[in-house]
Amino acid sequence: MNLNLQNRVALITGGSKGIGYSMAKQLGAAGAKLVICARNSQGLDEARTSLESQGFEVLTVSADVCMPQDIERLVETAHSHFGRVDILVNNAVSSSQNSFDALSDEEWRHHIDVKLMGYIRCIRAVVPHMKSQNWGRIINIAGITARDVSAYRMTNGVVNAGITNFTKHLAEQVGSSGITVNAIHPGYTWTPRLESALEKWATLENMSIEQVIALRLKEIPIGRFIQPEDMANLAVFLCSELAGAITGQAIAVDGGSSRAIQY
């Protein structure tokens, strides 16, 4: 199956590990050239070495999505290096796991700034390039808490719901320029971030880590945690020519764990 992604340039934020790294890997396998960004230079170096060993062309840029000047530098560096930016995968995140009464104003502001505003900043920077090409693909990673309530992920739910709403609005505004915009809702995805969250939930629920894992697995009809590759496979399809008529959508990759009905 020809996805027509050969030599497309894909920029992935939070791309040094977990879901972002898997997105980079799968897009690279489909023929895309890669630009990955994260704050941690060591993590970026390790990711680049791994991706280059698989034969992919990779540019790494250390950037903080809370800093508008960093985002401008990221996108301009990518465009100067490769001559174009075709795909943006917004994946950077930083959040707190806690009950409502334990969440501070700063934690709320930080999550909104990193994820919702970080996504908006990146999109604002890449859209002019995509419009000039009359082609672009934007993927926003927004957790399943956009649909479902979770006791210790309130900031996640509010921010992810905002990203989903923004995705729909943006898709309407840029569709005539050949740009599609979609959101992917990951369910319980086995990454270092989930492992850390499980440990926090175990403390909050006064349970062992094994008990918490078993409890979460019961919520997933397919009986396993989602893997980063599950999200990346969908992202590659949405970035391809085959998905040219799919835009403004929010698609869950959660193994059936979400109980919300979406129309």
Image: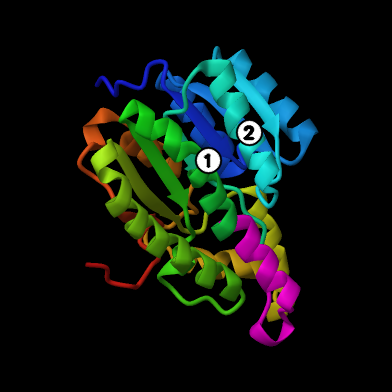
Marks 2/1 in contact by CB < 8 Å: the verdict is yes
User: From this viewpoint, is residue 243 visible?
Assistant: yes
Magenta stretch: dominant SS? helix
| Image mark for residue 125 | 1
Q: How far apart are marks 2 and 1 (CA)?
A: 9 Å
| Image mark for residue 74 | 2
Q: Which residue is drawn at 44% across and 31% down?
A: 129
| Image mark for residue 233 | none
Mark closer to the observer (2, 1):
1
> Could you tell me residue 110's position as x and y percent?
69, 64
> Could you tell me residue 176's position as x and y percent?
24, 42
Q: Residue at x 53, y 76 (%)?
A: 150
Relative to 117, is 136 on the left or the right? left
> Could you tell me residue 25's position as x and y percent?
52, 28
Q: Earlier in the sequence, mark 2 or mark 1?
A: 2
**Which kind of residue does numbered mark 1 sit on?**
Ala
Whether residue 169 is in magenta: the answer is no
Considering depth in this image, is 109 or 206 the residue closer to the camera? 109
Q: Is residue 37 above or below residue 109?
A: above
Q: What element carries label 1?
A: helix
Q: Which residue is drawn at 62% across and 25% down?
A: 77
Whether residue 99 is in magenta: the answer is yes
> Could you tell me residue 108's position as x and y percent?
66, 72
Q: Residue furthest bottom?
A: 101
Q: Is residue 262 above or below residue 67?
A: below
